[in-house]
Amino acid sequence: MDKIELLMPAGDLTRLKIALLYGGDAVFIGGKHFSLRAKASNFTLEDIEEGVKFAHSLNKKVYVTVNIVPHYRDLEQIEEYLKALDKIHVDALIVSSLYIISLIKKLNLNLEAHVSTQVSAMNQETLMFYKSLGATRVVLARECTLSEINVLAGSKITEIEVFIHGGLCSSISGRCSLSNYMVSRDANRGGCAHSCRWEYHLYQDNQLVSQDSFPIGSKDLCGIKKVSDLIEANVSSLKIEGRMKSAYYLAKCAKIYKSVIDSYYNHTLTKEILDKKENELNDMENRPLTEGYLKQGEITSNDLIHVKPHNVKQRYLGYVDDYDEITQKATIIRKNDIRNGQKIKVICYDQEDFIIDINGLSDDQGMLEIANKTENIVYFNSGRKLKKYYLLEEIE
């Protein structure tokens, strides 16, 4: 039996590499155009080519989102763009427009077409329709329940991809006009302002009902305890949302979900493991987590809606950019405060995590007791070898 795919997001080249190194089997990314995350760093064609070469060197895949709902001006140079993606051997496109799907066939490209969750696929007829157009995979609507996923994936009409973790949407499969209305940013053309996550007050007859504010947006999805169910349902790919998320978030999510997937196939998965991994995921999020529509049984508003974020510690300190084995000096891209003498955890992609002490902390201006400048490069000494893209985490 082929293992289920773990599909990770990536907002830039560094995060692409980290997502794959820490356990992702594939990544989905956006180019500078035609993508629904215009505010992400996104990839030039040169970046995409480098990312594809890196992924393929690990026998992994890259999918590029071309999933906007296009207006007539949005399709200028689309043919040249698709041909360029095909030339650099991108594995698949994630698309929502029937026209863009048809272009892949018309241009005789080797690219697979994966149908975006934006089309809200929730029945077998929809799967058969997109298969008839040449699509090889459909990303199901996030509103599908676990029992519906069982039926759709069990039909084996086409490959099925399911969201397993990350942001949900207060609208239907992301098709929302709230951002358009509030700030004239089109959510379906890459400009979502996440207006549902703003703080709102409730009024009645022009009178404020309560001083307490609330968001419209939902809790974040966490399906870690549904991995086994989705594997057994014949789902092809488990997708983690978050192209705007940090390298730390991607590495931790990839490592946690991959360990659960591997434990399932090794017949070593237990309730204790799942509880532990769920707690680790909960520590990373600033919004409460939910199984959402993957929950078995009746789904209530309490399963989706939250009132206030919960506190999350800023434990991510940075990542290793370089290590000199002769001088034993590590170069760090810092993300949060690092103190000389501090004991930290090193999170690894190819061995067990370990603990080290920060000694000889410095930057280009000299020695430091604390590194707390924005996005600065710092150095420290480590007798233990550190590899590029190892992460540094504060110990509680």
Image (cartoon, helix red, strand yellow):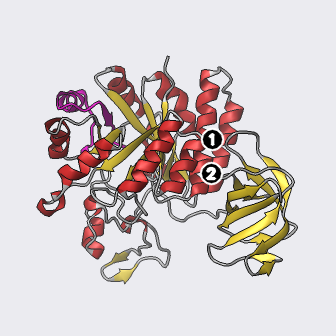
Please tell me whether residue 63 is drawn above or below residue 355 in the rendered image.
Answer: above
Q: Is residue 146 magenta?
A: no
Residue at x 42% of width, y 60% of height? 217
SS class, disc 1 = helix
Q: Is residue 314 visible?
A: no
Please tell me whether residue 144 is drawn above or below residue 378 in the rendered image.
Answer: above
Q: Is residue 321 visible?
A: yes
Q: Position of residue 39 (x, y in %)?
A: 39, 66
Residue topped by disc 2: 282
Label 1 Cα crowd, 10 Å radius (few <14 / some 14-19 / many 20+): many
Q: Position of residue 239 (x, y in %)?
A: 45, 41
Residue in the foreground of this view, choosing between 315 and 291: 315
Q: Which residues are magenta?
A: 119-142
Residue in the foreground of this view, choosing between 77 and 237: 77
Residue in the foreground of this view, choosing between 149 and 345: 345
Label 2 Cα crowd, 10 Å radius (few <14 / some 14-19 / many 20+): some
Q: Residue furthest front?
A: 326
Residue at x 82% of width, y 55% of height? 326
Image-based side of 299 in relation to 383, left or right? left
Please tell me whether residue 299 is drawn above or below residue 126 in the rendered image.
Answer: below
Residue topped by disc 1: 256
Query: Which amino acid, by three-letter code, is at mark 2?
Result: Asn
Can you say which quadrant of the picture contains the C terminus?
bottom right
Query: Which amino acid, by three-letter code, is at mark 1?
Result: Ile
Residue at x 79% of width, y 76% of height? 370
